Image (spheres, grey):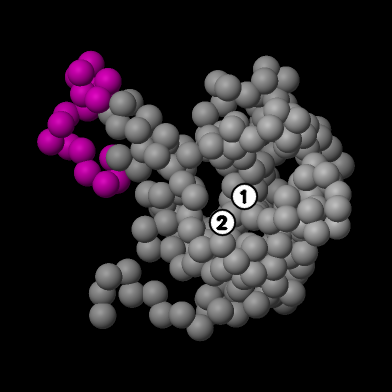
Amino acid sequence: MFDRFFKDRKKDKGKKYDNLPLHIAVIPDGNGRWAKKRKLPRTAGHRAGSNTLKTVVKYLSGIGVRFFTIYAFSTENWTRPKEEVASLMNLLLEYLRNAERELEGSNIRIRVIGNRERLSTELQNEILRVEKMTFANTGLNLVFAINYGGRDEIAEAAAKMARDVKRGKLRLNDIDEKVFESYLYTNDIPDPDLVIRTSGEIRSSNFLLWQTAYSEFAFPEVLWPDFTVKYMEQALEEYKSRVRRFGGI
């Protein structure tokens, strides 16, 4: 299904694609600690993290990575202070509103996964606008996971399948992994080859639980606002050195 992305990538000249991940996902941890170290409000850390995202996206787009998923806001993040939640939502809204200017000439497609029902109408409308605006772009797929939770996604997919079985649209005996995957938010997105979590924390935090079954993980200790291209290059070199057996020998 995703062979065409590899073929398209190889057409570009002057780039190094040896064992380059098709899909990289990031858990951008450490914004709050970055701000605390500098005696700044946590909102300053999130804004610094937003700037890091722009740098990383530009780099990955340039080297030919085809999918980049950022864990922008989890289903658990609603428990944070209201001021911080509002700040995060405003940053997301700002990024999307400025997408035309920020991504001009980059051929990047923006996509959003997660449950949108709890998001403000303003943010939902902006997501739809940007997704429509960038739909035909054939470069990097920049995927924002907003109000996303891996368990929530799996439970929702199971409920949808159950409804389709009840309505006669799906036969119980036809359900397998591929059918189940078609009910996920990521039904037309390949599983991540590499997952990076910054700040030294070593856990997945309910992120892409189904999709990361055979992903490679990297846990650099640097806080997300300080995550420069140098650290991404290090993560890519580490990825290239690994042998992926997918359960085989």
Does residue 111 lie above or below 127 as drawn?
below
236 drawn magenta: no
Residue ID for mark 2: 25
Q: Nearer the viewer, residue 64 or 21?
A: 21
Q: Position of residue 89 (x, y in %)?
A: 72, 32
Q: Is residue 187 left or right of residue 145?
A: left
What kind of residue is marked 2?
Ala
Pinpoint residue 86: horizontal percent, then vertical percent: 74, 29
Q: Is residue 66 above or below residue 207?
A: below
Tag 2–tag 1 contact (CB < 8 Å): yes
Question: Which quadrant: the C terminus?
Answer: bottom left
Q: Position of residue 242 (x, y in %)?
A: 46, 80
Magenta: predominant secondary structure element? helix
* Residue range corresponding to the magenta coloring: 162-179
Task: Quadrant for residue 137, please give it.
Answer: top right
Question: Does residue 82 appear to the left or right of 44 in the view shown?
Answer: left
Q: What residue does disc 1 label?
A: 70
Amino acid at dot 1: Ile
In 3D space, how far apart are the residues under numbered discs 2 and 1 (Cα atoms)? 6 Å
Residue 224 visible somewhere in the drawing: yes
Residue at x 64%, y 43% (from the top left corner): 72
Residue lying farthest to the bottom in this orientation? 241
Find out whether residue 167 is within the magenta segment: yes
The residue drawn where x is 33% and y is 26% is 160
